């Protein structure tokens, strides 16, 4: 039995009369690559937002490697090693691609502000080290040519990739990706799948919310299907593809 | 008892003007989502036009009244079409807010040029003799004020709820994009709300002018108090802002009548801070948390970076120029201005870190200058404390104030944070005037010694120049080190997207506070040096208009660059020296510069120049000596 990176128990949240997230329970095993799928409005992103406390949950419990994290500030959750990206690629405007990626390393800047102020050797070496790592990551995803371009000038697909790379700079234990393939073409999606597998193999637990079935079915170890705020199915991609409730949720009531 | 009733009536009259100004705020806010700081200026525009028509031209009151109201409306229309309307669609919220402050300054400057700096008072519409009602004396003008206010409220209510144009205005308020899709001409509605607000201001200014005295810069007073009324009442509700205005008027008159008129401002501001903290939505609105959750995504600045060797060359060149300037311009007048430029620049650097990097608008930077200036000056003159100790004490006090202010305002963002800093600046302002025993009051504090350090005195402009230059060099090295590293990136990420920053582990409140503390410390340092250099300090040298002036300097120079703002400071400090008649137009020019830079030069002088230089270098050498990246375009 592997340790659970994330354990969600009975998570619920209503907006007005709408149960956006209704008694959701699941666990993400350490070292796995899980995916959450579901039709529009199923509450996929809401689950992420509740886990990272962007919205407060009404009920439920969330444990991150055994520690309850519900109600902690988003920054504290990030500090514990749970890093997320956003559906709308929230890269920082007014910064270059490199600076954006470097900003992801915020939690790993060890030199205190006064050392940075004095241009001390240690602080500068650390900067150089982080920059080298950021360059390597940019190179890995093919964004090296855009290193010094304003990040907001990149096409949408590249911005999404940049956000993933920025999250990787934070060296997460668990990476939550919100629709990373939105805006990517087929070739880029294949590259992303490759990247996600590599990330998982490097020991980082990954969870994606995704619309793109070919990506999910290609890379996920386990798939959770949400509809109208509740989990309707979970299992391996093969199981999910044959599950009638899932087909019903996606195609409509035919059974 | 009679005295109390009389004070309350006076307060209600005063308050009804605040209420009408607040209605103007609320109207523009509803249509555009922007706070228009120029609102109060239209009161003065209307009143001074009325003075010219009625007193200088001898027109009868009704004719002069109509003329003045139409004139105010026309001015509002031209100004709004040229500045506010294009800005609404182009600028992010916080910049728009600051830009309307520029429109206020511009209008004040224009009034100064046309009407001069003397106070004006209109003759009452129906004679001087007050009416006696059961032993209480009411000035006849009071009936005009009450009548005009009622008429305005009823007309506005009718227009907004009973006419098609009013519905269109309200539709814009709900959703601008949807309004456009429904065929509503949103820019025209924006202009309409701006002009209507100008008319409201003009009318209330005209009717109140006979019982108060107006100068070119009284507009800021109306803006402040109208704004405070809005904050008390809650932006969303017309009834709320009217109540807020009346309440504020009465509270202010009671404070002036029973405590001291010098503290009336301070008490009003205390009221504002209390409301902001206790009921952030205003006293009369539904209790939803007031928080500006919109993140600033529309930042279209160029990224100005000078790489590696280019940076070293630039720094060496700047250093050489800094050292040589007193020899290049030995004239006393210019050297004097250079010293002032340097001293103000120190404060503006702090402001740049806060606004340009951390993205927090502060309208109270001069308040920290006042803390530093007065602390050092009082310690030096009354207690014979060494200047350096005085400076450090001032900085400690300013840092304490900044920490306190950022702790109490931690929940506020955007416009409301700016409002709190404005209140802070005005509060310091009113303390420096009110605590006359300690600060010398409005007439100032004289006999401040020169700065000296271990027997070395910096008495001449020449000596002072090198002291200030030295401080600036040290600050530049330290802060450049800071902003090029992790700390700077964290600040910038807080500026552009607080949610994403927090998701990457940035402790957002702590970084905001750090930027605020550094900027307060630099403001204080600058204020102390200012006092030591002039040997004199008065409240208006470090008053609220100074805060706006420094913002103009920052924006004109180029925010978020640390180096850039020096060009803005130099421009606004040196021009009046080099070109004496310009001094008269200085206020106007400051406002114009701020507005124009926001509209047409978003990167400031530094950013724009750097872009041109980099293009030239690239053309000549065929390679990128200065790496420059064009800013992203707004959607």
Image (tube, helix red, strand yellow):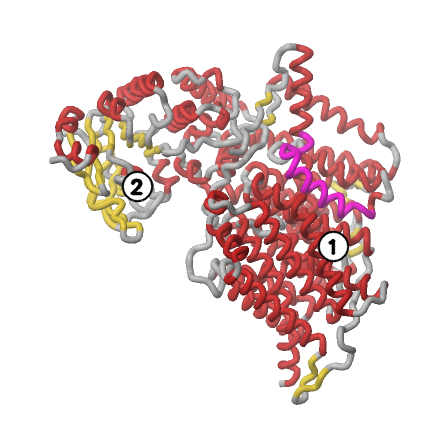
Q: At 71% across and 40% down in the image, what residue appears?
A: B593
Secondary structure found at label 2: helix
The residue carrying mark 2 is: A46
Q: Is residue B575 left or right of residue A96?
A: right
Which of the 4 image quadrants contains residue B213?
A: bottom right
Q: Which residues are magenta?
A: B584-606
- For residue B403, above or below residue B329: below
Q: What residue sits right under mark 1 in the picture?
A: B540
Whole-percent x and y of residue B540? 74, 54
Main structural element of the magenta stretch: helix, strand or loop?
helix
- Numbered tag placed on residue A70 in the rendering: none
Is residue A159 one of those drawn in magenta?
A: no
Nearest the eye: B215 or B199? B199
Measured as percent of width and height from the top left, residue A56 is found at: 32, 48
Parent chain of label 1? B
Residue nearest the viewer, comparing B420 with A160: A160
Residue B596 belongs to the span the image colors magenta: yes
Q: Residues within 10 Å of mark 1 (few under 14, many from 20)?
A: some
């Amino acid at each position: 039995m592997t340790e659970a990176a994330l354990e969600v128990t009975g998570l619920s949240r209503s907006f007005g009369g709408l149960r956006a997230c209704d008694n959701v329970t699941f666990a993400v095993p350490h070292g796995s690559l899980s995916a959450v799928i579901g039709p529009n409005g199923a509450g996929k992103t809401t689950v992420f937002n509740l886990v990272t406390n962007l919205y407060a949950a009404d009920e439920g419990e969330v444990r991150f490697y055994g520690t309850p994290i519900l109600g902690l500030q988003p920054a504290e959750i990030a500090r514990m090693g749970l890093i997320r990206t956003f559906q709308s690629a929230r890269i920082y405007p007014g910064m270059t691609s490199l600076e954006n990626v470097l900003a992801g390393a915020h939690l790993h800047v060890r030199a205190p502000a006064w050392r940075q102020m004095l241009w001390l050797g240690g602080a500068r070496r650390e900067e150089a080290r982080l920059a080298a790592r950021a360059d390597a990551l940019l190179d890995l995803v093919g964004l090296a040519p855009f290193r010094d371009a304003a990040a907001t000038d990149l096409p949408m697909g590249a911005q999404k990739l940049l956000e993933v790379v920025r999250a990787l700079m934070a060296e997460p234990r668990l990476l939550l990706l919100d629709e990373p393939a939105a805006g990517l073409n087929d070739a880029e999606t294949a590259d992303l799948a490759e990247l996600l597998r590599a990330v998982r193999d490097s020991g980082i637990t990954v969870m994606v919310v995704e619309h793109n079935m070919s990506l999910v079915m290609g890379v996920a170890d386990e798939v959770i299907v949400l509809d109208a705020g509740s989990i309707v199915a979970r299992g391996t991609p093969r199981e999910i593809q044959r599950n009638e409730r899932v087909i019903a949720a996606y195609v409509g009531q035919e059974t | 008892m009679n005295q109390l009733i009389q004070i309350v009536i006076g307060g209600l009259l005063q308050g009804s003007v605040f209420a009408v100004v607040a209605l103007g705020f609320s109207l523009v806010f509803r249509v555009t989502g922007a706070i228009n700081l120029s609102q109060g200026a239209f009161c003065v525009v209307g009143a001074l036009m009325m003075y010219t028509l009625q007193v200088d031209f001898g027109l009868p009151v009704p004719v002069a009244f109509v003329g003045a109201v139409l004139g105010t409306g026309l001015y509002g229309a031209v100004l709004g079409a040229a500045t506010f309307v294009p800005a609404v669609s182009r600028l992010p919220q916080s910049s728009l807010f600051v830009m309307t402050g520029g429109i206020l300054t511009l209008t004040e400057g224009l009034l100064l040029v046309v009407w001069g700096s003397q106070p004006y008072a209109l003759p009452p519409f129906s004679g001087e003799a007050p009416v006696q009602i059961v032993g209480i004396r009411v000035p006849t003008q009071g009936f005009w004020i009450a009548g005009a206010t009622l008429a305005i409220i009823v007309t506005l209510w009718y227009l907004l709820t009973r006419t098609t144009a009013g519905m269109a205005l309200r539709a814009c308020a709900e959703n601008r994009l949807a309004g456009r899709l429904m065929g509503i001409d949103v820019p025209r509605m924006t202009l309409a709300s701006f002009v209507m607000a100008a008319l409201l201001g003009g009318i209330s200014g005209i009717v109140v002018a006979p019982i108060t005295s107006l100068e070119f810069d009284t507009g800021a007073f109306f803006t402040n108090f109208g704004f405070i009324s809005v904050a008390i009442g809650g932006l969303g509700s017309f009834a709320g802002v009217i109540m807020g205005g009346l309440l504020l008027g009465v509270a202010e008159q009671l404070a002036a009548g029973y405590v001291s008129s010098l503290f009336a401002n301070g008490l009003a501001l205390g009221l504002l801070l209390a409301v902001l903290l206790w009921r952030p939505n205003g006293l009369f609105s539904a209790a939803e948390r007031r928080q500006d959750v919109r993140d600033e995504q529309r930042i279209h600045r160029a990224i100005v970076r000078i790489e590696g060797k280019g940076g070293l060359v630039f720094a060496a060149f700047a250093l050489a120029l800094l050292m040589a300037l007193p020899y290049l311009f030995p004239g006393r007048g210019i050297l004097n201005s250079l010293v002032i430029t340097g001293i103000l620049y120190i404060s503006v650097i702090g402001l740049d870190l806060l606004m340009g990097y951390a993205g927090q608008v502060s309208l109270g930077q001069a308040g920290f200058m006042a803390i530093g200036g007065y602390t050092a000056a009082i310690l030096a003159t009354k207690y014979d404390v060494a200047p350096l100790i005085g400076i450090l004490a001032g900085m400690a006090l300013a840092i304490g104030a900044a920490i306190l202010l950022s702790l109490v305002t931690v929940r506020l963002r955007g416009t409301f944070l700016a409002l709190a800093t404005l209140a802070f600046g005005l509060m310091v302002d009113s303390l420096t005037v009110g605590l006359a025993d300690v600060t010398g009051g409005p007439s100032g504090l004289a006999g401040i010694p020169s700065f000296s350090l271990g027997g070395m005195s910096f008495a001449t402009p020449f000596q002072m120049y090198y002291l200030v230059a030295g401080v600036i060099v040290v600050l530049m090295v330290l802060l450049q080190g800071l902003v090029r590293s992790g700390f700077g990136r964290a600040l910038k990420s807080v500026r552009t997207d607080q949610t994403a920053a927090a998701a990457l582990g940035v402790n957002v409140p702590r970084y905001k506070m750090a930027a605020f503390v550094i900027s307060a410390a630099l403001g204080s340092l600058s204020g102390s040096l200012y006092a030591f250099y002039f040997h004199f300090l008065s409240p208006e040298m470090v008053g609220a208009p100074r805060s706006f002036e420094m913002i103009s300097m920052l924006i004109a120079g180029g925010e978020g660059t640390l180096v850039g703002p020096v060009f803005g400071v130099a421009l606004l400090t040196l021009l009046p020296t080099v070109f004496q008649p310009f001094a008269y137009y200085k206020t106007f020019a400051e406002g114009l510069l701020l507005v124009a830079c926001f509209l047409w030069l978003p990167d400031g002088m530094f950013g724009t120049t750097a872009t041109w230089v980099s293009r030239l270098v690239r053309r000549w050498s065929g390679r990128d000596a200065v790496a420059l990246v064009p800013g992203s375009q707004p959607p």
